[in-house]
Image (spheres, rainbow, N blue to C red):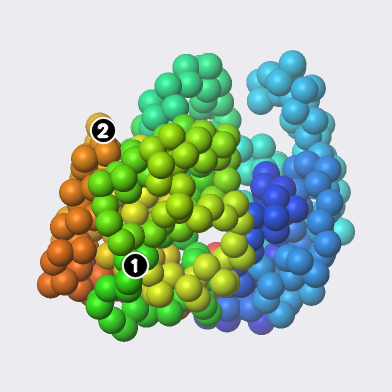
Amino acid sequence: MIITEKKTLMVIIRDKLSSLVKKGEITERYYNPGNLFNEVHIVMTSDDKVNIDDVQKTVGEAKLYIHNIELKNEKYASTLGFHTGYLSKWAQKGIELAKQISPSLIRCHGNYVNTYLAYKIKQALNIPYIVSLHTNPDEAVIVLKDFRRGIFNKLLDPLSKTVLKNADLVIPVYESIIPYLERLRVSNYEIIYNMINPSNLVKKDTYSLSSPVKIISVGRQLKGKDISNLIKALRGLNNVTLKVVGDGPLHNHLLNIAKEYKVDDKISFSKCIANDMLCRELAEYDIFCTHTDYYEMPKAILEPLLTGLPVILNRRKGKPVPEYKESFIYLTDNTEIGYRDAIQRLIDDEKLRSSLGICAFLHSSENWSPDKVEAKLIDTYSKIVGRCL
């Protein structure tokens, strides 16, 4: 079914659009799959400002409007807003905006105050909302060993349960999020993988090695994603280079590790590369390699797998990530020796290299290719809006 009567979408996000622009994380039609809507209103729960032209591609051909309904963090925290009337008072601004916009659907990314706003709008105006979850909050606490965050999450549980159970659909973008939903007894969910670049990913067409061998690592540089052991591993490898893409609190630490281990001449660091350019270039590399303790599979890993790059990842402590299969990902220990041996193995074994890459491409194409994800989203949005018209 295609929406024919109402074509207005309201997207409520906690992300700061200016930060996504700065990091190059702007994905074509991310907020408007298939150009389904001809008008999209993005609502940020902050006072962030952004040039509308810089984010237009996220809504495709739709007319884009950007709004701010700021929730001041200091007041929210000091009043424990999710347990008082403070959030309800704040949400009234969103209800008034929704009355003016009259959207046929509200879309939220992440389960927090933005989804509470969608819930209150639905209560007042009977507008359906969909929310996607991109992390498992329970596992994030374990990875980061952030017990204060754990307490906060527990305090947030009643609100989370309410807004998720009242959503017209919850979309966990990875299998690893399902245990969190089951703990909250949320059953109205469907896995739809994260929307990745639909136009610029290039399939790798050769597994012959470059000289020097070109390795790439992409990801946020923070606790739980520390690639120090990968960098250290280079000191025992000849004729290799490493491209590191990303930024974060550990950036300077990684620069210092590279100098300390005297491998800085083998590494180039780029804090930011536009996602379109990165996706076009991935197939030119020989190996993708990174480290993550998180229980989710980020876009930074979805993309090289769909390109058909051989991928090396660390074995995660605790529950393994459901999507990480050894048929198409080379799993190793998060140690200097582990990464060095894994890289050397793939350098020496072209049959293994090509097998991993080809299997990665085939599995990814079946499960999270942009075309299939976008088609699923179009169908889902249309059905929900259709039954509410």
27 left or right of 294? right
Position in image of residue 206 (x %, y %): 28, 81
How crowded is the residue under tag 1: few (<14 C-alpha within 10 Å), some, or many (20+)?
Answer: few
Residue in the image at 61% along x and 72% along y: 29
**Residue 256 percent coordinates (x, y):** 50, 35
Q: Position of residue 286 (x, y in %)?
A: 32, 68
* Residue tagged 2: 317
Q: Residue at x 81, y 39 (%)?
A: 70
Can you see residue 94?
no
Rate crowding at label 2 as few (under 14), some (14 to 19) or many (20 or more) other CA atoms within 10 Å: few
Quadrant of the rendered image containing residue 166: top right
Q: Residue at x 25, y 32 (%)?
A: 318
The one of 347 and 386 positioned closer to us in this rendering: 347
Residue 98 visible: yes
Number of callouts = 2
* Front label number (1 vs 2): 1
Dot 1 amino acid type = Pro
Q: Could you say whether the residue bearing mark 2 is in a helix, strand or loop?
A: loop
Work out how far the residue at label 1 is from the one at label 2, CA to CA, in angstroms: 32 Å
Under circle 1, the secondary element is loop
For badge 2, the amino acid type reads Lys
324 left or right, relative to 136: left
The dot on residue 212 is 1
The quadrant holding residue 173 is: bottom left
Image coordinates for residue 11, horizontal then vertical, percent: 69, 57
Q: Nearer the viewer, residue 285 or 162?
A: 285
